[in-house]
Amino acid sequence: MERVILTGDRPTGRLHVGHYVGSLKRRVELQNSGAYNKIFIMIADAQALTDNADHPEKVRQNIIEVALDYLACGLDPAMSVLFVQSHISELCELSFYYMNLVTVSRLQRNPTVKSEIQMRNFGESIPVGFFTYPISQAADITAFKATTVPVGEDQLPMLEQTKEIVRKFNSVYGEVLVEPEILLPDNKACLRLPGIDGKSKMSKSLNNCIYLSDTPEEIKQKVMSMFTDPNHLRVDDPGTVKGNPVFTYLDAFCSNEHFQHHLLEYKNLDELKEHYSRGGLGDMKVKKFLNAVLQEELEPIRIRRREFEKDIPEVYNILQKGSCIAKEAAANTLSEVKRAMKINYFEDKELIINCMRP
Ligand code: TRP
């Protein structure tokens, strides 16, 4: 069987380091591994509109920001199809048919939808499109017959929902759709990188993100203001590593080479953690090291981004070309789906013959 990747992001802002360690970095590695027949990377503008109906301009402007972040991280249009969701109208058609295979109560139980409804204070006024976005996400994934979906942990319930739709469709209409596998980051710290304030998740509205496009000064300023162990008042005090975002970031980003480049007194992160826990290691020193690590990791990304920013029409061109390729793939699946559902009335000669009267 072909190995196909589909994944994507909502264009509601520039991408941050949480996106990077949670998914982007892995996508680039998978792309470069050569182990996949096809790779589709989608800018989910239609999904972004499900809770931004009043702000189409925000979504519109962020399509280019996300595209620039993708290219900056090393997604290569020669190897990966970069495309815009709303261009693929076939996705709406698939969603329409999948809607009949999902119950309202099943959607109400989707933990991601539940917590997002709370986060957005929708109360009783949940837009129908938002409520049903797990179904449209199933259309995104199945339209490309994706076998592998590299995403963050928060997307697990979406994948579960997709698998249920696939099983239901295939059992009712015949084997057409492919059940996808989720691919989560191996590194636990990358599953859910906290914001610089130590809050559970990086989020634009909480103003606690480090963006891939931040300047070196912004990165430094954010790292220096990071939340750490509040009980670690004096350098000599023993410090807590667990739940300390500075160490979570180091877990996510740093390798032994970073110690050789920036902090020769320690061989690896375990030694640094041990010293911090024992006492005698100040927050400042750890933050300076984290800053050096982040600067090293993010500099090449920022430089590549600046290059692509010089030719915005070319970036749109890449998206348009990708969208045409993606549309063709989705159209193939849609026609298989309609054939399986036997709603391809005008193509089906047998149907016409059988209805003919003597
Ligand atoms: N829900 C994803 C997010 O919030 C974006 C997305 C839409 C997606 N469709 C997808 C991700 C299909 C993976 C597969 O970032």
Image (cartoon, rainbow, N blue to C red):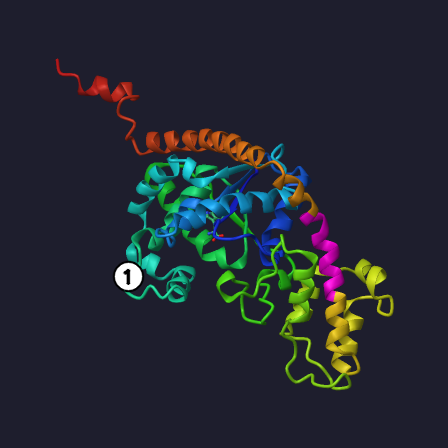
On screen, 295 above or below 97? below
- Residue at the image position 65 percent from the left and 79 percent from the top: 229
Residue picked out by circle 1: 125
Residue 162 x/y as whole percent: 42, 49
On screen, 318 above or below 253? above
Q: Toward the viewer: 329 or 125?
A: 125
Q: Is residue 115 left or right of residue 189?
A: left
Q: Secondary structure under badge 1?
A: loop
Which quadrant of the figure has residue 75? Answer: top right
Farthest-out residue, top: 358
Residue 228 x/y as whole percent: 65, 76
Q: Is residue 44 left or right of residue 345?
A: right
- Residue 161 seen from this side: yes
- Residue at the image position 53 percent from the left and 65 percent from the top: 207
Dominant SS of magenta comes to: helix
Q: Is residue 299 magenta?
A: yes
Report the magenta residues as a range: 290-302
What is the quadrant of the C terminus in the image?
A: top left
- Residue at the image position 52 percent from the left and 45 percent from the top: 7
Residue 26 x/y as whole percent: 63, 49
- Residue at the image position 78 percent from the left and 86 percent from the top: 236
What is the quadrant of the N terminus in the image?
A: top right
Residue 298 x/y as whole percent: 69, 53
- Residue 148 seen from this side: no
Q: What amino acid is found at the position of numbered circle 1 in the picture? A: Ser
Q: Is residue 205 magenta?
A: no
On screen, 36 above or below 49? above
Farthest-out residue, right: 265
Q: Toward the viewer: 19 or 151?
A: 19
